[in-house]
Image (cartoon, rainbow, N blue to C red):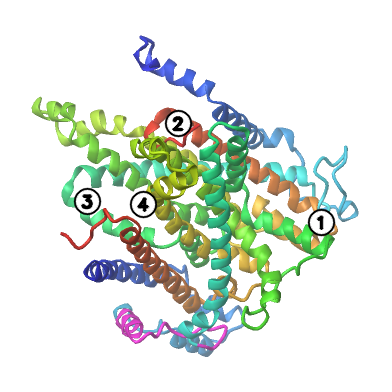
């Protein structure tokens, strides 16, 4: 298992190398002169030269590339123009916020998505099943930023139950955190609840038809055991794949959600960097988030091995 | 089994689609949006950017079907023209994916030597979360609809190519392909005449969902200020502008949001229907 894990990490290296090359290339697609865009109309030639120097774009491209990778290996992702702070440090400082929000949304997704999907599969073709499928269809079709706005109008402005935005660290004030994070987490989770319910239902339906489930029932095992142990354990593999996708969607969806709810996480950092043309921050933020998600997916692969004893990675 | 009946396969497929409730609902919803987009100059003849300050913040009424916004512009016009922009964005992304996704997918699936190179590039592009890469690209290229389309194509073509590749790989090994080769058919002929027509089903399903993602992502990007620049109306930027007045004039964000949701819902239902009928392996149990 350990060997598999190391191997899997090694296969991620070329991907990360390509990913970093693409983010580097992206910043060189900026049409015209980024210094002119940053400096504005009134910038003097000296100021423009200074901006070019600060960005490092006054040097030949291969030197920029070498410096970029040299920096990466030292954990140096450049400096944010807007914040005057290292990109890596600025991102890491906001990581707990995005992480706590994503975990909250993931918990909502897992509880609601799995429960709805399993219930629908057990009552196949019933009214409950149809209601779940219709709800899930709406879930995957509602634009999350729009849902967020409607929730703000309704729950924050009209009813005054929850704050319109902002963020309170969990360790400082758990209740405050819950109040601030609930609407963002729900608006972030709704799409994924729909996705997960759909997949859970179809895999459960497939598993419940298998011979071993019939055998388990024939043995006279109680229904809860048949469903919970025999069927669900076998349905978990495809579900885990979807959970991997869901984590990616949650983390990247936080860009929009954090902006709407003024949550000071990585997402909001990225949007403000984009709107202020803080190119090093955009480049670094994109790279860090993607690298994190590549690692998450390795973790998901690892979960297969834990969940399914038939998956043997080290016997090859 | 209905497949044993001696009817023409095309008719049979259409019949099955028309009996699929979700498909019909989805097709109906999407047709409405499509008609609104095509007929925009007829049904919304007013200029969607014309400012009339004395008409500002009028709620939906007989005279102003969808109400007016903070500049007194008719939301009816703005939402209808926004539909046109959404539909065109979706169509362009779908067309680019159909061409380049098929091309790269077929090349990777058929020519083993190209496979490795193309798939490593797609691995890297797919490692980026879709919306983040789209945001990154539009942030760099500047806000405009054509850049949004380009960004969405870069994001989704690798995913489409994967789907085409996986069916090409299976069909490549089929006996009838071997037979065609034994008859002396060249690679291109085999790909064009034998492999691609038989790998279209998953592609068509993918493209209908892709249409939905594209419309949704375009709206999200223009909501963030990365799509078409105001005063050009897009569903996303109408909502972004209306956000400031959402308590005073909630219809400014409610109406384009409903339009967006119904479009995406229609396309998703359409996609589910196509998948159930064309590609039963991927079926979500009805």
Mark 3, other Cα within 10 Å: few <14 / some 14–19 / many ≥20: some
Task: Let me know if residue A83 is in the magenta part.
Answer: yes
Mark before the other along the chain sequence, 4 or 3: 3
Q: Disc 4: which chain? A: B
Question: Which residue is identified by label 1?
Answer: B71
Which percent across, then down, holds residue A315?
Answer: 17, 60
Residue at 57% from the left image edge and 85% from the top image edge: A83
Residue B231 visible in the shown view: no
Real-space Cα separation, disc 2 to disc 4, in angstroms: 24 Å
Indicate the quadrant where residue A260 lies: bottom right
User: Is disc 1 in the same subunit as disc 3?
Assistant: yes
**Residue A144, label in figure:** none
- Depth check: A214 or B265 in front? A214
Mark before the other along the chain sequence, 3 or 2: 3
Q: Nearer the viewer, mark 4 or mark 1?
A: 4
Q: Disc 2: which chain? A: B
Above or below: residue A310 compared with residue B208: below
């Amino acid at each position: 298992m350990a060997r598999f894990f190391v191997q899997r990490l090694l296969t991620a290296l070329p991907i990360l190398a390509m990913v970093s090359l693409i983010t580097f290339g992206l910043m060189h697609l900026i049409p015209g002169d980024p210094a002119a865009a940053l400096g504005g109309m009134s910038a003097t030639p000296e100021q423009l030269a200074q901006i070019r120097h600060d960005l490092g774009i006054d040097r030949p491209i291969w030197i920029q590339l070498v410096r970029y990778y040299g920096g990466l290996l030292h954990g140096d992702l450049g400096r944010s123009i807007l914040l005057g702070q290292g990109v890596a440090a600025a991102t890491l400082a906001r990581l707990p916020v995005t992480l706590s929000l994503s975990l909250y949304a993931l918990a909502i997704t897992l509880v609601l998505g799995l429960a709805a999907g399993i219930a629908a599969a057990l009552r196949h073709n019933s009214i409950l099943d149809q209601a779940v499928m219709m709800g899930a269809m709406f879930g995957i079709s509602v634009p999350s930023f729009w849902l967020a706005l409607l929730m703000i109008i309704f729950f924050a402005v009209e009813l005054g139950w929850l704050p319109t935005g902002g963020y309170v660290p969990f360790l400082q004030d758990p209740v405050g955190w819950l109040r601030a994070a609930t609407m963002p987490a729900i608006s972030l989770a709704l799409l994924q609840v729909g996705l997960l319910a759909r997949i859970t239902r179809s895999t459960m339906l497939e598993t419940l038809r298998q011979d071993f489930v019939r055998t388990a029932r024939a043995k006279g095992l109680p229904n809860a055991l048949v469903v919970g142990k025999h069927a669900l354990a076998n349905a978990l593999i495809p579900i885990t794949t979807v959970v991997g996708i869901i984590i990616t969607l949650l983390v990247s969806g936080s860009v929009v959600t954090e902006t709407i709810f003024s949550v000071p996480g990585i997402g909001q950092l990225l949007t403000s960097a984009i709107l202020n043309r803080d190119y090093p921050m955009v480049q670094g933020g994109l790279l860090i988030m993607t690298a994190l998600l590549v690692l998450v997916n390795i973790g998901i692969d690892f979960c297969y091995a834990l969940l399914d004893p038939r998956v043997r990675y080290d016997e090859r | 089994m209905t497949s044993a009946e001696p009817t023409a396969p095309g008719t049979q497929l259409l019949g099955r689609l028309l009996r699929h409730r979700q498909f019909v609902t989805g097709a109906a919803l999407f047709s409405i949006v499509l008609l609104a987009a095509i007929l925009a100059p007829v049904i919304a003849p007013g200029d969607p950017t014309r400012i009339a300050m004395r008409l500002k913040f009028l709620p939906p009424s007989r005279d102003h079907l969808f109400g007016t916004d903070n500049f007194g512009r008719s939301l009816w016009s703005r939402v209808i023209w926004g539909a046109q922009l959404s539909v065109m964005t979706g169509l362009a992304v779908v067309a680019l994916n159909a061409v380049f996704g098929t091309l790269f997918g077929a090349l990777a699936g058929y020519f083993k030597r190209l496979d490795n190179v193309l798939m490593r590039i797609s691995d890297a592009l797919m490692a980026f979360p879709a919306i983040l890469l789209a945001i990154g690209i539009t942030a760099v290229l500047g806000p405009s609809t054509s850049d949004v389309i380009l960004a969405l194509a870069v994001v989704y073509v690798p995913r489409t190519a994967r789907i085409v590749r996986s069916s090409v790989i299976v069909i490549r090994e089929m006996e009838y392909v071997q037979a065609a080769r034994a008859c002396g058919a060249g690679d291109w002929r085999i790909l064009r005449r034998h492999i691609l027509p038989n790998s279209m089903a998953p592609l068509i399903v993918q493209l209908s969902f892709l249409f939905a993602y594209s419309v949704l992502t375009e709206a999200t990007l223009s909501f963030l200020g990365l799509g078409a620049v105001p005063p050009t109306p897009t569903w996303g930027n109408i909502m972004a502008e209306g956000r400031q007045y959402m308590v005073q004039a909630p219809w400014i964000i409610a109406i384009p949001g409903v339009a967006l949701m119904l479009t995406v819902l229609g396309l998703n239902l359409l996609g589910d229907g196509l998948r159930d009928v064309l590609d039963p392996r991927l079926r979500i149990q009805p």
